[in-house]
Amino acid sequence: MESPFDQAQRWTSVWINYANKMSQAGMMFDPAKAPPEVARQMRSMTFSSMSQYAEQFMRSPEFLTAMKQSLDTAIAFRKQMNDFLTTMQHNVQGVARQDVDSLMVTMRHVESRALDSMAAITQKLDAILQRLDELEKRSAAKEPAET
């Protein structure tokens, strides 16, 4: 882990390099070229150095660490707020989102169990109907033979 002084020194060198590139872009004036072309060239060099240093900055370990800490803090804050709001909702004897979510999960579970049971009952009824049809066919076949 780098000391804060080393980190500051590293950032200072990055921004000094950026400033040097920017100043070099302005000093590359060619009197033979038309002013709009010089302006385009300066703009191109400026944007190119800006994008290079922006990419270098965003890929640096310091920036990535800061982004990770920021996201972790935001997630922790969101969780704390959800817990706080749920507690407040319960304190005023209200229904919180977590309560509704758990109730929905329970209802889906009950629904799936009921549908599974109904499917099993339907299969059993179909088997019984098939057996009854077979018995009726047998009894119908025996009746004319007996008369």
Image (cartoon, rainbow, N blue to C red):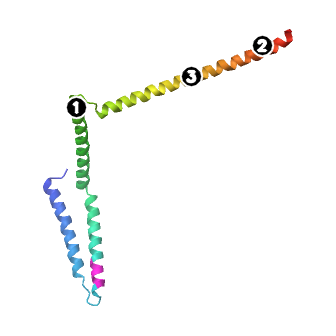
Q: Which mark is residue 58?
A: none
Label 3 SS: helix
Give the main secondary structure, helix, strand or loop, of the magenta stretch: helix
Q: Is residue 34 above or below residue 14?
A: below
Q: State if disc 3 and disc 1 touch (CB < 8 Å).
A: no
Report which residue position mark 3 lands on. 120
Q: Quadrant of residue 33?
A: bottom left
Q: Can you give x and y, in whole percent of width and height, for residue 130 in the image?
A: 69, 20
Mark 1: which amino acid?
Thr
Q: Residues within 10 Å of mark 3 (few under 14, many from 20)?
A: few
Report which residue position mark 2 lands on. 139
Q: Residues within 10 Å of mark 2 (few under 14, many from 20)?
A: few
| Residue pictured at 86% horizontal, 11% vertical | 145
Q: Can you give x and y, in whole percent of width and height, for residue 127 in the image?
A: 65, 20
Please name whichever residue, 140 or 78, is drawn nearer the observer in this view of the structure: 140
Report which residue position mark 1 lands on. 87
Mark 3: which amino acid?
Ala
Q: Distance from label 1 to label 3 (Cα)?
A: 43 Å
Mark 2: which amino acid?
Ser
Residue mark closest to the camera, 1 vs 2:
2
Q: Can you give x and y, in whole percent of width and height, for residue 36 in the image?
A: 29, 84
- Which span of residues is magenta-colored? 36-42
Label 2 SS: helix
Q: Residues within 10 Å of mark 1 (few under 14, many from 20)?
A: some
Q: Distance from label 1 to label 2 (Cα)?
A: 70 Å
Q: Quadrant of residue 90?
A: top left
